[in-house]
Image (tube, coloured by chain):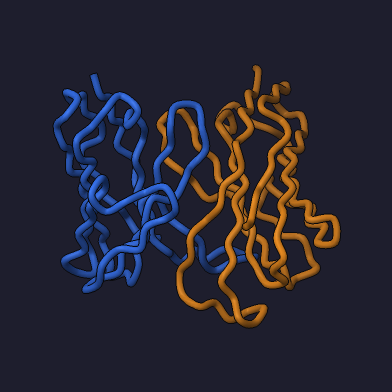
Amino acid sequence: SAVISQKPSRDICQRGTSLTIQCQVDSQVTMMFWYRQQPGQSLTLIATANQGSEATYESGFVIDKFPISRPNLTFSTLTVSNMSPEDSSIYLCSVEDVFFWESSNYGYTFGSGTRLTVV
Amino acid sequence: AQTVTQSQPEMSVQEAETVTLSCTYDTSENNYYLFWYKQPPSRQMILVIRQEAYKQQNATENRFSVNFQKAAKSFSLKISDSQLGDTAMYFCAFETGFSEPSIRQGAQKLVFGQGTRLTINP
């Protein structure tokens, strides 16, 4: 299955600043997904990133707050801009992947997540 | 809109016991896939099992199996012979975006349930 390197693993940031999170995949993928997991909550999709086009954002998320870059088929960044304490969450990237199991052949692999704390 | 509901916020069983986690979903789609993911304290999301809605046979992967009831929109996960390493948050997830039962229109977003915190006690 794919290996995703996500950086940084954690950070503590001052309010009003920005943080850029990187995801590097060891294989070429068409689409990359960015999720947010607020403390004690489930995962919510922020946006879908295609190489060579603008990201598609879910309701409640805007490009000015969460700009995304997708310069090639193995890399993407998510920036959390003008941060406030409400942005404290785990941010995860995800890609479609192939799993050679008895009952399935694909799923989604996730990065290890970035734990962001805004103070 | 699709929604996924996990009605058990927390569960706890003894090692080697069997445990079943519940998941229901709501959709008007006929073609979709369902997943169970586990998230241990390391926060890494790990795929446990997947079920295609067009398949009547329940998916099985080693100690993990599902009970998929399409008419009832129910997708429960059974963990047999539970182990200490099974301790984690478990998320049920739903994926649509299929024109035909087995023809996906590329990678799609996942809609997740709220999660069930499972603790396996020694």
Q: Nearer the viewer, residue B55 or B74?
A: B74
Q: Quadrant of residue B97?
A: bottom right
Q: Nearer the viewer, residue A59 or A46?
A: A59
Q: Is residue A38 left or right of residue B84?
A: left
Q: Residue at coordinates 35% horizontally, 51% vertically from top-left?
A: A34
Q: Residue at coordinates 58% horizontally, 28% vertically from top-left?
A: B87
Q: Nearer the viewer, residue B98 or B26?
A: B26
Q: Is residue A55 above or below residue B101?
A: above
Q: Is residue A87 above or below residue A34?
A: above
Which quarter of the rendered picture does the N terminus of chain B lie within? Answer: bottom right
Q: Is residue A72 left or right of residue B56?
A: left
Q: Is residue A97 left or right of residue B101?
A: left
Q: Residue at coordinates 30% horizontally, 24% vertically from top-left?
A: A85
Q: Residue furthest right?
A: B71
Q: Quadrant of residue B54?
A: bottom right
Q: Is residue B80 above or below residue B42?
A: below
Residue A56 in picture, x, y percent from top left: 35, 63
Residue B104 in picture, x, y percent from top left: 54, 77
Marks counted in the figure total 0
Residue A36 in picture, x, y percent from top left: 40, 41
Residue B38 in picture, x, y percent from top left: 54, 40
Q: What colour denotes chain A?
A: blue
Q: Is residue A2 above or below residue B89?
A: below
Q: What colour denotes chain B?
A: orange
Q: Residue at coordinates 65% horizontally, 17% vertically from top-left?
A: B122
Q: Is residue B43 left or right of residue A20?
A: right
